[in-house]
Amino acid sequence: MFRFALVAFLAVAGSAASAPAVSEVDGMIQPGYWEVTNKLSAVISQTKKEKRCITPAEVSKFMMGPSNRHYACTYPTRSFKNGQISLKGSCASKKGRQVGIEAKGSYSPTTFKLVADVDTTYAGIPLGGRASTEARRIGDVCPPDAKRG
């Protein structure tokens, strides 16, 4: 169940195919070296912290969420304006499992925060969880060994 919830969270902001073009977002984060903390609270809790390089070409993908080969996501409600994020939609696995997602957050050129509530069922039992991503820019230049992509 935890793996399912984590995979669902990775789809929080949709796949690259469903992400709006950069021009549809009011303001963006700056490329550079970032510290990113992902938290998941479902059946169990997990926190993952990493430092990574975000290139100019990756800014939109980072803001919209990571690509996910497990889920196809659609967001009838998607807004990135005035430093505020609002997403509401659903994701479906290749096997048809549905996950409802509602997320709110904020962003600036040097910060990004997104909190998502995830709802699904497993073996007919309703399950919910909360996932968050919080990031802050820590430098203009990425070290040569920095994680990328």
Image (tube, helix red, strand yellow):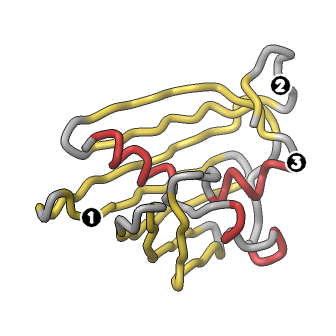
The residue positioned 56% from the left and 62% from the top of the image is: 13
- Label 3: few (<14), some (14–19) or many (≥20) C-alpha neighbours in 10 Å: few
User: Does residue 127 lie above or below 75 as drawn?
Assistant: above
Q: Amino acid at mark 2?
A: Cys
Name the secondary structure under disc 1.
Answer: strand
Tell me whether circle 3 and circle 2 mark residues in contact (CB < 8 Å): no
- Per the image, the residue denoted by label 2 is 142
Looking at the image, is mark 3 or mark 1 earlier in the sequence?
Answer: 3
User: Which marked residue is nearer to the observer: mark 1 or mark 2?
Assistant: 1
The residue positioned 51% from the left and 59% from the top of the image is: 71
Q: Which mark is residue 101?
A: none
Closer to us: 124 or 20: 124
How far separated are the C-alphas under marks 3 and 2?
A: 12 Å
Tell me whether circle 1 and circle 2 mark residues in contact (CB < 8 Å): no
Looking at the image, is mark 1 or mark 2 earlier in the sequence?
Answer: 1
Name the secondary structure under disc 3.
Answer: helix
Q: Which mark is residue 56?
A: 3
Q: Amino acid at mark 3?
A: Pro
- Label 2: few (<14), some (14–19) or many (≥20) C-alpha neighbours in 10 Å: some
Name the secondary structure under disc 2.
Answer: loop
Q: Quadrant of the N terminus?
A: top left
Within the image, what quadrant is residue 50 found in? top right
Whole-percent x and y of residue 133? 49, 46
Q: Amino acid at mark 1?
A: Thr
How far separated are the C-alphas under marks 1 and 2?
A: 38 Å
Q: Quadrant of the C terminus?
A: top right
The residue positioned 33% from the left and 48% from the top of the image is: 5
Tell me whether circle 3 and circle 1 mark residues in contact (CB < 8 Å): no
- Per the image, the residue denoted by label 1 is 120
